[in-house]
Amino acid sequence: MMRRHGIRHLPVVAGDGLVGILSLRDLHLLETLRDVDPEKVTVDEAMTRSPYTVEPGAAVETVAQTLAENKWGSAVVVDGGKVVGMFTTTDALKLLGRLLKNERLRAARVRRLRRKRAGLTD
Protein backbone atom coordinates (compact mmCIF):
# COMPACT_ATOMS: atom_id res chain seq x y z
CA MET A 1 0.00 0.00 0.00
CA MET A 2 2.81 2.44 0.82
CA ARG A 3 4.55 1.73 -2.49
CA ARG A 4 1.33 2.10 -4.45
CA HIS A 5 0.73 5.57 -2.98
CA GLY A 6 4.35 6.72 -3.14
CA ILE A 7 4.70 6.88 0.65
CA ARG A 8 8.22 6.15 1.86
CA HIS A 9 7.88 7.07 5.56
CA LEU A 10 4.85 6.66 7.77
CA PRO A 11 4.69 7.82 11.40
CA VAL A 12 3.15 5.30 13.78
CA VAL A 13 1.03 6.77 16.56
CA ALA A 14 -0.74 5.32 19.54
CA GLY A 15 -3.41 7.68 20.81
CA ASP A 16 -1.90 11.09 20.26
CA GLY A 17 1.72 10.02 20.75
CA LEU A 18 4.38 9.00 18.28
CA VAL A 19 5.66 5.47 18.92
CA GLY A 20 7.69 4.82 15.78
CA ILE A 21 8.08 5.13 12.05
CA LEU A 22 7.56 2.59 9.32
CA SER A 23 9.61 3.04 6.16
CA LEU A 24 9.84 1.31 2.84
CA ARG A 25 13.34 0.32 3.93
CA ASP A 26 11.84 -1.50 6.92
CA LEU A 27 9.42 -3.33 4.64
CA HIS A 28 12.17 -4.23 2.18
CA LEU A 29 14.24 -5.69 5.00
CA LEU A 30 11.33 -7.87 6.08
CA GLU A 31 10.87 -9.12 2.53
CA THR A 32 14.51 -10.21 2.34
CA LEU A 33 14.64 -12.09 5.64
CA ARG A 34 14.47 -15.83 5.43
CA ASP A 35 11.94 -17.63 7.60
CA VAL A 36 9.89 -14.43 8.01
CA ASP A 37 6.46 -14.11 6.44
CA PRO A 38 5.99 -10.37 5.79
CA GLU A 39 2.22 -10.92 5.73
CA LYS A 40 2.30 -11.99 9.38
CA VAL A 41 4.61 -9.30 10.79
CA THR A 42 2.83 -6.55 12.70
CA VAL A 43 3.55 -2.83 12.33
CA ASP A 44 4.80 -2.84 15.91
CA GLU A 45 7.40 -5.47 15.01
CA ALA A 46 8.44 -3.83 11.74
CA MET A 47 8.63 -0.17 12.74
CA THR A 48 11.66 1.73 13.93
CA ARG A 49 11.14 2.94 17.47
CA SER A 50 12.20 6.40 18.65
CA PRO A 51 12.49 8.06 15.24
CA TYR A 52 14.23 11.38 14.73
CA THR A 53 11.79 14.14 15.66
CA VAL A 54 11.90 17.90 15.24
CA GLU A 55 9.67 20.81 16.17
CA PRO A 56 7.94 22.84 13.43
CA GLY A 57 10.36 25.75 13.97
CA ALA A 58 13.52 23.65 13.63
CA ALA A 59 16.17 25.05 11.30
CA VAL A 60 16.06 23.24 7.95
CA GLU A 61 19.86 23.42 7.74
CA THR A 62 20.24 21.52 11.02
CA VAL A 63 17.56 18.96 10.18
CA ALA A 64 18.97 18.29 6.69
CA GLN A 65 22.50 17.97 8.06
CA THR A 66 21.35 15.51 10.73
CA LEU A 67 19.46 13.44 8.15
CA ALA A 68 22.51 13.35 5.86
CA GLU A 69 25.02 12.53 8.62
CA ASN A 70 22.92 9.64 9.88
CA LYS A 71 21.68 8.51 6.46
CA TRP A 72 18.07 8.85 7.66
CA GLY A 73 15.30 9.45 5.17
CA SER A 74 12.99 11.56 7.30
CA ALA A 75 12.24 13.48 10.44
CA VAL A 76 8.85 13.38 12.11
CA VAL A 77 7.61 16.89 12.88
CA VAL A 78 6.04 16.96 16.33
CA ASP A 79 4.29 19.91 17.97
CA GLY A 80 3.23 19.61 21.60
CA GLY A 81 3.61 15.84 21.47
CA LYS A 82 1.41 15.49 18.37
CA VAL A 83 2.61 14.49 14.92
CA VAL A 84 1.98 17.40 12.55
CA GLY A 85 4.07 16.38 9.56
CA MET A 86 7.08 14.76 8.00
CA PHE A 87 10.24 16.32 6.61
CA THR A 88 12.05 14.05 4.17
CA THR A 89 15.26 14.09 2.20
CA THR A 90 13.07 14.72 -0.85
CA ASP A 91 11.74 17.87 0.83
CA ALA A 92 15.31 18.96 1.52
CA LEU A 93 16.33 18.37 -2.10
CA LYS A 94 13.31 20.33 -3.39
CA LEU A 95 14.30 23.23 -1.15
CA LEU A 96 17.91 23.00 -2.29
CA GLY A 97 16.76 23.12 -5.91
CA ARG A 98 14.70 26.26 -5.26
CA LEU A 99 17.57 27.92 -3.40
CA LEU A 100 20.03 27.15 -6.20
CA LYS A 101 17.60 28.45 -8.82
CA ASN A 102 17.06 31.66 -6.82
CA GLU A 103 20.81 32.10 -6.42
CA ARG A 104 21.36 31.59 -10.15
CA LEU A 105 18.67 34.21 -10.92
CA ARG A 106 20.15 36.64 -8.37
CA ALA A 107 23.62 36.21 -9.85
CA ALA A 108 22.25 36.89 -13.35
CA ARG A 109 20.57 40.10 -12.11
CA VAL A 110 23.82 41.23 -10.49
CA ARG A 111 25.74 40.57 -13.73
CA ARG A 112 23.18 42.54 -15.76
CA LEU A 113 23.32 45.45 -13.28
CA ARG A 114 27.14 45.48 -13.38
CA ARG A 115 27.10 45.45 -17.20
CA LYS A 116 24.58 48.28 -17.25
CA ARG A 117 26.64 50.36 -14.82
CA ALA A 118 29.72 49.72 -16.96
CA GLY A 119 27.83 51.04 -19.99
CA LEU A 120 27.65 47.67 -21.68
CA THR A 121 24.44 46.51 -23.33
CA ASP A 122 22.87 43.07 -23.06
Image (cartoon, rainbow, N blue to C red):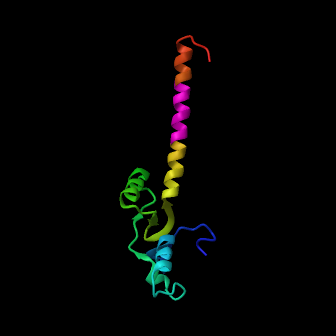
Q: Looking at the image, which residue is at 51% across and 87% down? A: 37
Q: Looking at the image, which residue is at 57% across and 68% down? A: 7
Return the residue nearer the eye: 111 or 80: 111
Task: Report the magenta stretch's main SS.
Answer: helix
Q: Where does residue 85 sit, x and y in percent of width and height?
A: 51, 65
Q: Is residue 73 magenta?
A: no
Quadrant in which the C terminus is drawn? top right
Return the residue nearer the eye: 36 or 16: 36
Q: Is residue 102 magenta?
A: yes
98 in relation to 23, above or below? above
86 in relation to 15, above or below? above
The residue stretch that appears in magenta: 100-110
Q: Looking at the image, which residue is at 45% across and 81% down? A: 33
Total numbered labels placed on residues in the image: 0
Q: Where does residue 13 sit, x and y in percent of width and height?
A: 48, 77
Quadrant in which the N terminus is drawn? bottom right
Q: Where does residue 83 sit, x and y in percent of width and height?
A: 48, 69
Q: Where does residue 108 sit, x and y in percent of width and height?
A: 55, 28
Give the residue furthest to the front.
34
Q: Looking at the image, which residue is at 41% across and 50% down? A: 61
